[in-house]
Amino acid sequence: MARKRANGEGTIRKRADGSWEARYCADGKRHSVYGRTQAEVRKKLTEVSVTIDHGDFREDSGLTLGQWLTMWHRDYLGNVKLGTADTYEMQIRVHIIPALGDVKLSALRTPMIQRLYNKKREEGLSPKSIKNIHGCLHKALDVAVRIGSLSKNPSGNCILPRIEQAEIHPLDTPELSKLLAFLKGHEHEALIVTAIFTGLRSGELLGLTWNSVDFENGLIRVTKQLAQPRKKGEVFRFATPKNSKPRTIAPAPTVFQMLKKYKEEQEAQRKALGPAWNDGGFPNLVFNHPDGSHYSQPTIWKEFQNILAAAGLEHHRVHDLRHTFAVNSIMAGDDIKTLQENMGHYSAAFTLDRYGHVTETMRRESSNRMQTFIEKMA
């Protein structure tokens, strides 16, 4: 009994004019490829520019991966933040196109992509950076699948290097006390103290405007950040916070007392400068240079290093102030869900994973206190 051909399996025959034809079926339809020799059509059948993958048929778009990525970035990113789109553009231009840009989209296979990731790791790229490259490529290929240019996403089965959680370095209590004492009356006191006791990200601090500071109700609404230019020709701009999640926080009253005094000083400076006051297109900023212009993150980083050195403290990143807020919040008794909302994390699970060691330390300390209590009772 003759075996029934599977969907996509082809037959080859010689035609009356001496040429050769290969026929195959896909999606319930019959298709043909032609050639001058049997070997030619056999090759076309096995490497035909349609993807016949377990019976799934896709017309070949004729695009290379590089061409598709350019189209995807141009036409299919209307729902992502501008900063995210800029990051994708860099990953495409720097990492993906140089390695795989000339490969036909229909010919792209998992091992090719895996080799790219392995090579990047050998070159010293971090697991997190490789994960970001993968995220960009995977999203682009998913769209290609949805519009029918691919039958399946070849990046789906790639193995990514394991990401080790980076150790955090918050300021401990003696360091924090020393820093706060040094900042008394310093021109950057309000900025640094607000960072320490709100956990705002650098961009959120620099993009904070006075209409987001509710003195009457003791609230700060975090709705935007000041985004840095990422490439030549771009300018500073307001953008939504990370994860596109605006939030409202309720800092300690001391923060508002300090901000109220700082606002009065800022207003006096603005009036004194008159027309020389230059907000640079960002009016109403809470933190700015004495002439009214906005700060940049590199400037704040440099100023913070100068402050640490003058205070006799070791190196810390500005971002370590955010970690300091998180650790002190937990030590003060905040639950993980509250901390997650204050920090603007996308999930409580992420917050717990990031700062779980603090709660573990607290549990051990609680156990030790209970043991001391038991021993006293004996």
Image: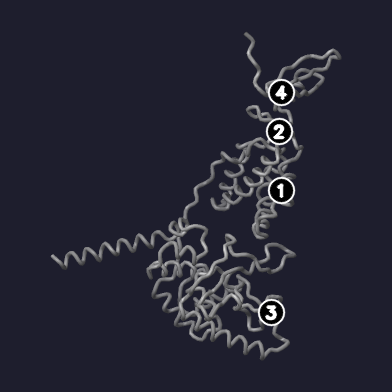
Residue 360 position, x and y percent, is 35, 59
For marks 1 and 2, the one nearer the N-term is 2
Q: How many angstroms separate mark 4 from mark 3 (CA)? A: 67 Å
Which SS class for mark 2?
Answer: strand
Which SS class for mark 1?
Answer: helix
Q: How many angstroms separate mark 4 from mark 1 (CA)? A: 30 Å
Q: Nearer the viewer, residue 321 or 253?
A: 253
Q: Is residue 354 left or right of residue 150?
A: left
Could you tell me the amino acid type at mark 1? Trp
For marks 4 and 1, the one nearer the N-term is 4
Q: Residues within 10 Å of mark 3 (few under 14, many from 20)?
A: some
Q: Which residue is mark 4?
A: 25
Q: Nearer the viewer, residue 226 or 112?
A: 226
Q: Which residue is mark 1?
A: 72
- Report the quarter where the C terminus lies: bottom left
Residue 64 position, x and y percent, is 74, 41
- Report the quarter where the N terminus lies: top right
For marks 2 and 3, the one nearer the N-term is 2
Labels 2 & 4 near each other (Cβ < 8 A): no
Q: Is residue 207 left or right of residue 39?
A: left
